[in-house]
Image (cartoon, rainbow, N blue to C red):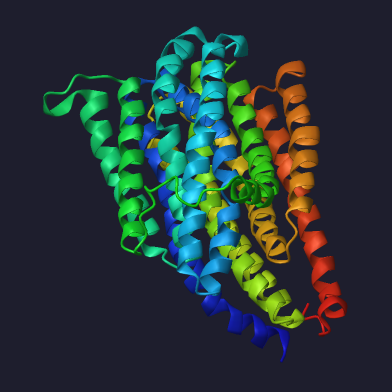
Amino acid sequence: MPLVDTLRRELRPTVSLAAPVVIAEVGWVAMQIVDIAMVGRLGPEAIGAVGVGSALFLAFSVLGMGLLLGLDTLVSQAFGARDRKQCDRWLRHGIFLALVLTLPLGLLARTAGNHLDLWGFDPDVLLLVRPYFAIVTWSLPLLLLYAAFRRYLQAVSVVRPIMVALVTANVVNAAANWVLVFGNLGAPALGVDGAGWATCISRAYMVIVLAGAVARQGVRPWTLIAGVRLAGLRRILELGWPAATQAALEYGAFAAVTMLAGRLDPSTLAAHQIVINLAGLTYMVPLGIASAGAVRVGHAVGRRDAAGASAAGWTAIALGTGFMASAAAMFLAVPGAILGIFTTDRGVVEVGLALIVLVALFQVFDGLQGVTTGALRGLGDTRTPMLLNLAGHWMIGLPVGYLLCFAIGWGVVGLWIGISTGLILVGCLVTAIWWGRARTLAAVLGDSPAA
């Protein structure tokens, strides 16, 4: 079958599989964007505090959520074997592990919160970020439980509740922000602290919704003790740690950039925080497509179809990069209107206009590295993206950004040039590796390559 026909055949199933996941991922990032938009009326210091606090908190929680990714494989395999009792057992292991991980990760987060002054933040930002970070840390067990429920539901092909939970959680979050940040409906006006409590409320809501969805599958996950074994916990961790490390390296690099930006003036930090959340929002689309690509590639490999695996990977890559090219064009076309959604502060907008151009320049490469990582995961390769993220972001991107920002004096623009350099490098390398792997699939699987 010609390549174009093969790619066209892959398009519909990939889009169908990716759409609910994309909506869920976008809903996830939209919650933080709502927080920033709400506190934006309080000034640049409030935007910076929410941004820094959220970035630091997610640096810890992403590691915990990543370790639960092993549930994808274990639950899906049990589901494929039509063993629902085994699915139930793996979920119980996941819930137990989520609760166990809460203690060490929570202690690390609390320790980091007690030493925020070491980063050299602006005093006005530091005054706000300390209590905000302490509040959102209470949502850590909720976030890990949500991750365990989500992994289970996705593995048994029940994705609609995940999408519904995240979309409606944005409504809950916005309403809670409106009440608690500004003191509406007789509530005290808590300012930035109110945004923290709104985050906790919305995450509790997500856990309740997904727990209900799990219960409708006939599972009673709250019976935690039965069937939990050390070997099962070890198996989840063995499968989850490479993906968790890769996610932590990638997200940690952006979190580190945010923490470094916190050493600059409040207007610069606020502009950075707005733009980095815009970049995160667009990235959720290729991230969702990456999940679909991993599944489609894995299915093709399982049936020893090299042409199908190659076509599935290239279709996902084309979808992801196509969207990111459109996002880049939008950023370049109406940057002022986009920034105006969050703030009218002239200093913040001025810096933001420079940063949004840099975001536009790396959009396609960000999409490439995200979707191609998913395609490689479908081949069973999680180690290569992990190593590339370590080298690209931590050995090149961050050092270059730090040098340009603080040694040469380019400020936050220098930080973004550094992180952009790392992203572009990772995007190019991971795509080259996928291209080589796709061509050699014929020899491995006994088929002719499709690309």
Indicate the quadrant where residue 286 lies.
Answer: bottom right
Q: Residue furthest left?
A: 186
Instruction: Using the image as rendered, state which of residue 128 and residue 113 is in the foreground.
Output: 113
| Residue under the image location 47 percent in, 37 percent down | 99
Q: Residue furthest bottom?
A: 1
Q: Position of residue 36 (x, y in %)?
A: 39, 32
Q: Is residue 267 left or right of residue 319?
A: left
Q: Is residue 291 above or below residue 131?
A: below
Q: Position of residue 65 (x, y in %)?
A: 54, 43
Indicate the quadrant where residue 358 lies.
Answer: top right
Residue 350, visible in the rendered structure: no
Residue 148, visible in the rendered structure: yes
Q: Position of residue 433 (x, y in %)?
A: 82, 60
Indicate the quadrant where residue 116 lies.
Answer: top right
Q: Total of numbered circles in the picture?
A: 0
Q: Position of residue 372 (x, y in %)?
A: 69, 60
Instruction: Using the image as rendered, state which of residue 420 and residue 192 is in the foreground.
Output: 192
Q: Is residue 429 above or below residue 54?
A: below
Instruction: Using the image as rendered, state which of residue 284 and residue 63 is in the foreground.
Output: 63
| Residue under the image location 51 percent in, 63 percent down | 86
| Residue under the image location 60 percent in, 61 percent down | 73
Q: Is residue 19 left or right of residue 405?
A: left
| Residue under the image location 40 percent in, 32 percent down | 139
Q: Is residue 5 above or below residue 451?
A: below
Q: Residue furthest front?
A: 226
Quadrant the N terminus occupies: bottom right
Quadrant the C terminus occupies: bottom right
Q: Is residue 175 left or right of residue 161?
A: left
